[in-house]
Structure formats: structure tokens, C-alpha cells
Amino acid sequence: MMLIHSIRSRGLFLSLAALICVLLMLGLPFGIIVLWSVSDGWFPPNLLPDGYTARHWLMFLSDPSLTSAVINSLVITVVVTVATMIIAMPTAWALARYDFALKRLVEIFVLAPLIVPGIVVAVGLGRVFLKLDLAYTMLGVIIIQVAGVLPMTIRILASGFEAIPADLIAAARTLGANRIAVTRHILIPLSIPAMLAAGLLSFIGSFEEFERTFIVGAPIVHTLTTRLYINLSGAGLVVPVASVVCLILLLPVFLIFMLTSRIMRDDVMAAGMGKL
Amino acid sequence: MRGDRLHLFLLLLPGIGVLVATFGLPLFWAVVGAFGLGADGTGFTLTPLADIFAEAKYRKGLMMSLYYAIAPTTLTLFVAIPLALLLQKSFIGRKLLNGLYKLPLAVPAIVAAFMVLTLFEQGGFVDRLLMLGGWSIGKIVRDPLGIGVILATLWKDVPFMTLIIAGAFGAIPGDTVHAARSLGATRLRAFWAVQLPLAMPGITAATLLCFVKSLGNFAAPSLLGPAYPLPLSILMYDSYRDGDWMAIYAMGTVLILAAFVVLAAYYTLTAAAFGAGKATTSR
């Protein structure tokens, strides 16, 4: 009995330690950024700001370059997510449900972008865009971001579509369901977890994207991440302003993450990535 | 039959077409361009590629790129595997932990870099905490070892890897581990001889993805890394702004080759250790 008890309390201790670690790894950095964003002077060695102000937040709202970055970010992300899903779905369906010669080759080609460093493709594509006058345009940024999230989206959708049992479709057809009914009552409901995972991943992937956007868009088309980079890499780093930009960047992503993590299943996402 | 073919072709066209246009062709031109061929070239040459290994700036840049990729990926493995195992167990607070650890996945890499700045720079929060005890943090941002870069990369990579590896462990039927245990295997041996080989495809995929992502890492090294040597990703960006296409193509080609070499080495090592092929899950 003693032994069981000690094992159990050791397990509890371990899980508690892990939980505290995670809270510290997340809470501390986020907390510091929140404090910086409302700080009115915060000099070493003080552990708390010397005073508090809403000045930096108000300044953000009245800075047209930052508000335009917010709008750019949102527009680009929504367009990229929708476009990626539309482009990926037929291809993922074909990879999941059809057998054809060279299928393995097509699958490897879809995975290939994942094992080539993104920056190499980005400068290569950037060169093409310079020739086509797509560099420094919204369209150029949208195209390069779609290129970035497409492989993973196809992968996740395909493994989701693959998991739909063919028997179920055959059974429904035998029982007299037509194509539309099969799509409505079987295919769509069973594809929702994978579509949700793929959509969420391309949304986050696009919203947090920096390198490609910076290469193709900056300094004309700015998103929040490229603005933040300019802010951080410049000589006059203003920590409170950078903190405000960080928090604005985190807000929509976190919201969506929280909302979907309730209905999303981990195994869908892991299955899409865990097979190379 | 013919109609079926056409149907399949039309289904594949959007995804594959976009990938050919945005990945296949640019990559092809970059590799061809590294040999002086194509629109930006002046005829076949090996000079740009040779320069990468001859010039200290590029040679050290390649080493730095590999370092920024291998060091965090290796460290991440040591955190992610235990964390993924822990998540297989049921305990109080598991749900909370399972939801929380994924948050950094949604945080942009630049924000992670900024967090490292506010926490670990000299005069940053951790430094201030240490001051209470009379210590100092020393230089871990823009330091020669790139510790700040590794910290930022680690923070982003741990949840990513844990998610995939936890999925791989979760897909192993619980019976197999129970069988090994009831046949007398110790907990450690069951992990080493049963769980780990069965989860190997997932672990390999996670390692590979993390490694390649870090190899092209730009934001963290440029904000937190030392000013010299710069990794190839930053050198490529500088050359891009200068329009030095030959150098870009050469660096890109070398980076791709380096990725392949490291991946091949990794596959050989894990295959030797775990007998890949035998150890693939049915899923």
C-alpha cells in the first residue's frame, strides 16, 4: 500500500511540476510584455514599472502605419486561408481517394517544400516576382504565403479524407442515397475535423508569417510581423510600442486558437504531419 | 477510362499546379542559376559555389546555419519526448497542460524573439531578478554562442514537436506496452524496446520538420544572434536586397544540399539504432 501511495504522490508531484513549468514558460514572458505595454518608465533594477499609462495603446490607434498593417494582416490572412483551402481540397481529395501511376511521386512533390528551407524558395520566388512586377504588391504577398501553407494543408486534408471509410459510402449508395446525399450526410460531416485543422493551421501560418512577406512585400506592403521586425531591428527600439504590436499580433491568433482547440482533435493535426 | 483520367487531372491541377509554379520552378531556377545558367547567369561556372567554401564569411555562415538548426532541434527532442510521454498518462491538470503547452505554436517567431529580449537581455527582467542576489546574467543575447537564438527557437519548437510525438505515442495500442510489461519488461525497457521504435516515424517527422524550419530561420538570428558570423539565411537576404543573384543561388543550393546531408545522416543513424522499416506503425 505504501508503495502504491508513494508512486501516486510522485506522479502527482511530477504533473504539478510540469504544470508549473509550463505556466512559468508562458505566463512570465506574456506578463512582462503586458506590463511593458502599459508602463510609464521602467528602469533597472525595478521589478515593476515605475508608473502606468495607456499612452502607448492610444498612440498605436492613431498611428496610420500601424493600423494599415493591422488591416493588411487581416485581409491577407483571410484571403490566404480561403484560397489555400479552395486550391488544396481537390488535390487532397485526389491523393486520398484515387490510385494512379506516379502517385508516390506526386506525394513526394507535395512534401518536398517541407524539407527545403523556406528562405531559399522565398528568394527564388521573389526574383520571379521582381520580373513579373508582383514584388511589393498585396497579390505577391498573398501568392507567396499560399505557397508556404499549401503543402501542409494538402497533407492534413488528404489524411483526413483518407480516414473516411469507403464502406460507409458504399453502404449509403446501396441504400439508395444519391451523390449529393452522400456528400451532405457522410463526406462533409466526417471531413470537418481535418478541414478545421487545416484551416486553422493556414490561418495561423499566414498571420504569423514573416520571412516571405518581408522579402516580397517590405518596405511597401507591411503586415504586423514585418512592422514589428522594423520596430525591433531599428536603432531606436521602443519597448512599450513593440509590446503593444506584439499583443495586437497575439490577440486574434489566441482567440481562434482558444475557440477551435475545444472542438479540434490533436490526432488530426498530428496525423497530417507525423507521416513523412 | 479517359473521362476518369481527365477527372483526376483536373482534381490534381490546382494544388500541384500552384506548387509547380511557386516551388518547383523557382527552386529549379535557383539550382540552375548557382551554376551560372539561366536568365541571370553568364554561362556554366562553378565559381559561386566554390566561393561559398573559399570565403570565410560564407563558410562560417554555413556552419552557423547548421548550428542554429541542429542545436535547438536536439535540445527540443530531450524536452518533447518526456512531455509527450507525460501527456499519455492521466493525472489532475492534464487537460489544462494539454491545452496550454500548444500556445507557442500560435505565437509568431518574432514575438518569441522579442520575449527573449525583454527577459534575457542585460537589464532585462531575469537580469533584474538576479541583481537582487547580486548576480548578473552575462551576455546571452547577441552572444557568440547564440544562446538567445537557441532559446527563442526552442520555445517555438517544443510544442510543435510534442504535438507530433504525442500523436505518435497515442497511436500505439495500449495493449502492446501492457504485453511487454506483463512479459517481464521493466518500464524503461518497454519504453526503449516497444514504445520508442513504434513512435519512431512520428519522432523522425518531427525532428526533420524542426530541423529544416530552423535551417532557414531569419528573424531570431537577426534580432538575437551575434553580428558575425551571420547564418546563410541572413546573408541570402542581404544579397537579395543587393541583387547579387549568383551568390543567392549558390547559398540556396548549398543550404538545400546541407539539409539533405544532415537528413541522410539522421536516417542512417536512426535506422541503425531502431531498424527502421521493421518499426513502422500500421497507420
Image (tube, coloured by chain):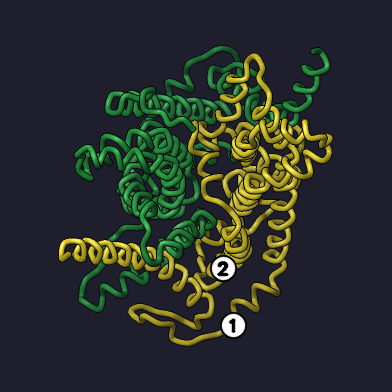
Chain colours: A yellow, B green
Picture quarter with the N terminus of chain A: bottom left
Q: Position of residue B281 (x, y in %)?
A: 43, 31
Q: Secondary structure at mark 2?
A: helix
In percent of the image, x 45 and y 54: which residue is there? B223
| Residue that label 1 marks | A54
Camera-nearest residue between B236 and B118: B118
A99 vs A213: above or below: above
When asked about the image quadrant of residue A105, the answer is top right
Q: Is residue B130 left or right of residue A147?
A: left
Of the numbered discs 1 and 2, the one sitting upstream in the chain is 1
Q: Quadrant of residue A150?
A: top right
Residue B65 shows in the view? no
Give the CA separation, mark 1 to mark 2: 14 Å
| Residue A212 point in image, percent of width and height | 61, 43
Q: Which residue is mark 2?
A: A247
Left or right: A152 with respect to B232? right
Identify the secondary structure beneath mark 1: loop
Label 1: how many residues lie within 10 Å, few (<14), some (14-19) or many (20+)? few
Q: Residue at x 32, y 50 (%)?
A: B82
**Looking at the image, which is closer to me, A210 or A275?**
A275
Circle 2 chain: A
- Amino acid under label 1? Ala
| For discs 1 and 2, the disc positioned in front in the rendered view | 2
The quadrant where residue A108 appears: top right
